[in-house]
Image: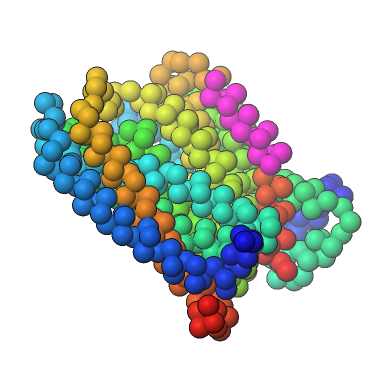
């Protein structure tokens, strides 16, 4: 079987359609299991009570927000270097899911911070760099949406995403440096000596669920993009396969 | 070639002096608004001065970035420059250099005056100027990537800000950090070294990315 066949959007369209249930169903099941373990089996934390349970969505969201940016830049780079349309489409569809998770990480972080730290927002190094990461996503999405020619949008987005990826570590370390300079108001994230087994399991299950959800949603969105850009070819493929 | 580009852009800028001057006045006005907004206490002003001057410098550089390639793009010069046998890297470096000389260097020159208004000491002013000299080329270089990507788009001036300002954050942190370290009596050298490192890195890599972005925008 020639896998390269699926690098063509027209051939990928029906394949993506078949793959989506295989990711969406386990995602739904794992979300249910993870939330059940997180809410009913994991014991309350002796310091934070029940408020820590928001971590089960917060940590996977923050994790995915960062990883999806790298993945997006990777796809955008492939699409630019090898002139592969499908890879560029994947990058555009990953961007929105990544921005969504970054936003979710910020919001859930604020909800967690209010009862635990007593404040919605602290200019902590991690929070500030997550906020900047969201700005980078917004830049990518708004650049792509203001360019009408899709191929130019793909390539321009690729340049921006790659410049962003090089800058992310620099931004992260400079924000950390900045934060230690302004020591006064910082609150360190509480270090727990150990994490209870069921807490860890719930976190890992939720992480897997978020990954599966991302794959499913990205595939759905990439199908929409293919339909938009290559209407006739995609419909044709759907009928013949 | 490099010298020719710089010379030509300087000449064009000289013929349109008002453009460069308006950037300078924008910088001065933004900085002057802060004492009006936060109150005239000299202690407070001294502590916010580094951040205010640097943020105003970032915003002012946004104004001139829109013009970096736009005029040459409209009259077709840019297309001819892309066709020259010389590497596009040098063309970009020349144009960015001229933009720095016409738009950023005046800001660096006027900054000590604004610093005095905020009650900074002489030694702190030196650090501010050195930081600006090291840091503003990074602003021009990174900004040129944004300018090239948004060439000829609707609302490109707002778009440049969204794309480029987040990438300016390290420069802001170390530039303002150097001045602040000096105010509270810590050595500022480490910040300046890091700013210098960023300048060198962006001179090497940014024109290359800008050249790629120009080729994408003009097809």
Q: What residue appears at the point 71 percent right and 47 percent down from the top-left corner?
A: B207
Q: Nearer the viewer, residue A108 or B167?
A: A108
Quarter of the image for residue B84 reads: bottom right
In the rendered image, residue A21, in percent from the top left (x then y), is placed at 36, 64
Camera sees residue B197? yes
Q: Position of residue B42 (x, y in %)?
A: 34, 30
Q: Can residue B6 be seen in this view?
A: no
Q: Residue at x 77, y 49 (%)?
A: B89
User: What is the number of callouts on the image?
Assistant: 0
Colour logic: rainbow
Q: In this view, does A119 lie above or below B63?
A: above
Quadrant that contains the N terminus of chain A? bottom right
Answer whether residue A60 is magenta in the image.
Answer: no
Horizontal arrangement in the rendering, residue B165 relative to residue A2 (left or right):
left
Q: Please tell me which residue lies in front, B74 or A169.
A: A169
Residue that appears at 63% across and 29% down: B197
Of all residues shown, which one is farthest toward the front?
Answer: A1
Magenta-colored stretch includes residue B192 = yes
Magenta span dominant secondary structure: helix
Give x and y (percent) for residue A97: 39, 57
Q: Residue at x 53, y 24 (%)?
A: B191
Q: In which quarter of the image is residue A44?
A: top left
**Residues shaded magenta:** B190-205
The vertical placement of A96 against B123, above or below, is below
Q: In the current view of this chain or complex, which residue is farthest to the right?
A: B85
List x then y, in percent, for residue A234: 54, 78
**Relative to residue B95, is residue A179 drawn left or right?**
left
Name the one closer to the observer, A124 or B77. A124
């Amino acid at each position: 079987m020639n896998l390269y066949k699926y690098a063509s959007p027209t051939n990928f369209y029906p394949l993506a359609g078949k793959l989506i249930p295989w990711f969406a169903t386990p995602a739904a099941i794992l979300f249910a299991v993870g939330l059940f373990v997180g809410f009913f089996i994991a014991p309350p934390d002796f310091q934070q009570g029940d408020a820590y349970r928001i971590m089960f969505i917060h940590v996977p969201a923050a994790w995915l927000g960062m990883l999806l940016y790298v993945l997006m830049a990777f796809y955008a780079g492939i699409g630019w270097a090898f002139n592969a349309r499908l890879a560029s489409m994947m990058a555009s569809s990953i961007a929105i899911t990544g921005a969504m998770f970054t936003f979710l990480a910020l919001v859930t972080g604020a909800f967690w911070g209010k009862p635990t730290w007593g404040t919605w927002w602290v200019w902590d190094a991690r929070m500030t760099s997550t906020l900047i990461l969201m700005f980078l996503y917004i830049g990518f999405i708004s650049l792509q949406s203001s360019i009408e020619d899709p191929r130019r949008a793909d390539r321009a987005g690729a340049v921006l995403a790659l410049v962003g990826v090089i800058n992310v570590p620099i931004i992260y370390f400079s924000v950390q440096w900045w934060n230690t300079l302004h020591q006064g108001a910082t609150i360190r994230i509480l270090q727990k000596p150990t994490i209870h087994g069921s807490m860890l399991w719930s976190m890992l299950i939720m992480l897997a669920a978020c990954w599966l959800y991302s794959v499913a949603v990205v595939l759905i969105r990439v199908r929409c993009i293919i339909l938009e850009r290559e209407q006739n070819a995609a419909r044709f493929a759907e009928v013949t396969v | 070639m490099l010298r020719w580009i710089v010379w030509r852009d300087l000449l064009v800028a000289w013929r349109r002096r008002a453009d460069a001057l308006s950037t300078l006045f924008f910088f001065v006005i933004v900085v002057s608004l802060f004492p009006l907004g936060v109150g005239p206490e000299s202690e407070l002003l001294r502590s916010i001065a580094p951040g205010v001057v640097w943020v105003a410098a970032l915003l002012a550089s946004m104004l001139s970035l829109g013009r970096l390639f736009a005029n040459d793009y409209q009259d077709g010069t840019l297309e001819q420059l892309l066709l020259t046998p010389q590497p596009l890297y040098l063309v970009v470096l020349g144009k960015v250099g001229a933009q720095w000389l016409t738009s950023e260097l005046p800001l660096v020159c006027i900054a000590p005056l604004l610093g005095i208004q905020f009650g900074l000491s002489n030694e702190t002013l030196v650090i501010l100027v050195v930081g600006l000299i090291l840091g503003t080329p990074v602003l021009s270089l990174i900004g040129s990537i944004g300018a090239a990507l948004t060439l000829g788009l609707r609302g490109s001036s707002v778009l440049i800000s969204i794309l480029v300002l987040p990438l300016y954050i390290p420069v802001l942190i170390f530039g303002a950090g150097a001045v602040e370290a000096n105010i509270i009596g810590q050595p500022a050298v480490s910040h300046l070294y890091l700013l210098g490192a960023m300048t060198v890195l962006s001179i090497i890599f940014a024109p290359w990315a800008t050249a790629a972005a120009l080729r994408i925008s003009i097809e």
